[in-house]
Amino acid sequence: MAAGADFSPPFTMLNSGYNKNNSDGSSLDKEISEIDGSLKQTTMGKPPRHLSIMRHSLSGTHLRSATDLDLDIGLSARSRSPSPSPSPSPLPSPSRVQSGFLPIFRSGSCSEIGPKQYMEDEHICIDNLPEHLGETAEFPSPGAFYGVFDGHGGVDAASFIRKNILKFIIEDPHYPTFMDKAIMSAFVKADHAFADAHSLDSSSGTTALTALIFGRTMLVANAGDCRAVLGKRGRAVELSKDHKPNSSSEKMRIEKLGGVVYDGYLNGQLSVARALGDWHMKGPKGSACPLSAEPELQETILTEEDEFLVLGCDGLWDVMSSQCAVTIVRKELMLHNDPERCSRVLVREALKRNTCDNLTVIVICFSPDPPPRIEVPKPRVRRSISLEGLTFLKGALEQ
């Protein structure tokens, strides 16, 4: 198949309408307001681009007024301990995946231009991958594939990678025995193929975040600052690391390869440390480069506690914590059980918080049922301290 062939069905911008009457907004406010709202995240914008190179762009419809959904969800600082990329491993053995739980995939997405002049995001949603690929691909069932691609300097790179990344995965020699190796190789091959597509602007670039799921095994691959967050019984579990140039691990890698980080930008030009495309910043194909197209992988075995996955570009995470997004989605699913409406709510909330970027969000559910209500057991014994005991304790502390 030609490198530029569109391997996946066309995807259209979703209608952003939302019926407020179908959502219990007051109940949502009450539950979300318990999230820590005192901390705010610092954000980093993308570097300025000359308008002359933004030739290839998509049009998007602005969302209606974001004030129709009155959420009061505080920002919270996020922390994570990045785990090293897992070593290559074959498909899981039957004993590894023995469980009564088998995920059923449902997804919804929303993509909006936001305050920017050009729409440079792309995304892909395939809930039934074996049916999409056909019988010749021999993909395990059930299976699904999702991706978010945040372009910069034009949409050429994001569009090309969206159309071709899955093709490079299933055509890799390691597929399907070593899925992780196939994904790692596919990112680099897609990057090289884009450089050879002379009809496209090779100076455009894109981040890439994909989730490939087969059975209960989910492989999340990320190159850039999009983020994957798992909703686990109401708790947010980050499955990717934001590749910012000033993060300690990325800065060390960049400087070791002769690059510099200036004011948070790679070589003073790019606000991400990993991306596909941007060939004006890379050397010959195959050479080590401060701007890397290699993804980091995270493998997860899904269980009954894993309710949904949120994939979003940095336009969402610049103004919202991972836990905040999971709390919103879980509450919305309990109200209407519609992942597409959940993605619209997240986009609308990001616009309310004055995001400065395009917005793309995918919500993937692993069950046909809404999340169950979480009951917090009340303590059986109330412990108290007498006034005498309190006075004694105070005196002891003051000594």
Image (cartoon, grey):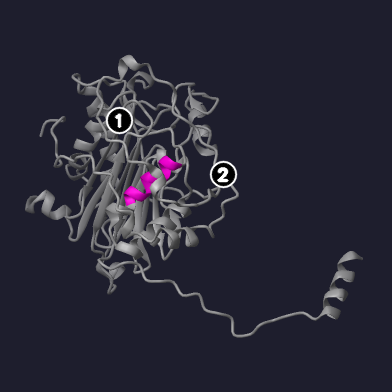
Q: Which residue is mark 2?
A: 40
Q: Residue 308: which disc?
A: none
CA separation in Å, label 2 and label 1: 27 Å
Front-lying residue, 70 or 377: 70
Q: Which residue is mark 1?
A: 119
311 relative to 214, above or below: above
Front-lying residue, 349 or 295: 349
7 relative to 31, above or below: above
144 sits to left or right of 81? left
231 sits to left or right of 393? left
Q: Where residue 336 sits in the image (x, y, percent)?
A: 30, 62
Q: Quarter-wise, where is residue 128 in the image?
A: bottom left
Within 10 angstroms of label 2, few (less than 14), some, or many (20 or more) residues?
Answer: some
- Answer yes or no: is residue 227 visible: no
Q: Quarter-wise, where is residue 103 in the image?
A: bottom left
Front-lying residue, 43 or 159: 43
Within 10 angstroms of label 1, few (less than 14), some, or many (20 or more) residues?
Answer: many
Residue type (three-letter) at the residue carrying disc 2? Lys
253 sits to left or right of 134? right
Q: What kind of element bears circle 2?
A: loop
- Image quadrant occupied by the N terminus: top left
Marks 2 & 1, CB-CB < 8 Å contact: no
Q: Which secondary structure dominates the residues rendered in magenta?
A: helix
Q: Where residue 208 sits in the image (x, y, percent)?
A: 33, 38
Residue at 48% x, 29% y is 254
Q: What kind of element bears circle 1?
A: loop
**Bounds of the magenta segment:** 343-352
Residue at 17% x, 42% y is 171
Does the stretch in magenta take in 344? yes
Residue type (three-letter) at the residue carrying disc 1? Met
219 sits to left or right of 73? left
Does the stretch in magenta take in 70? no
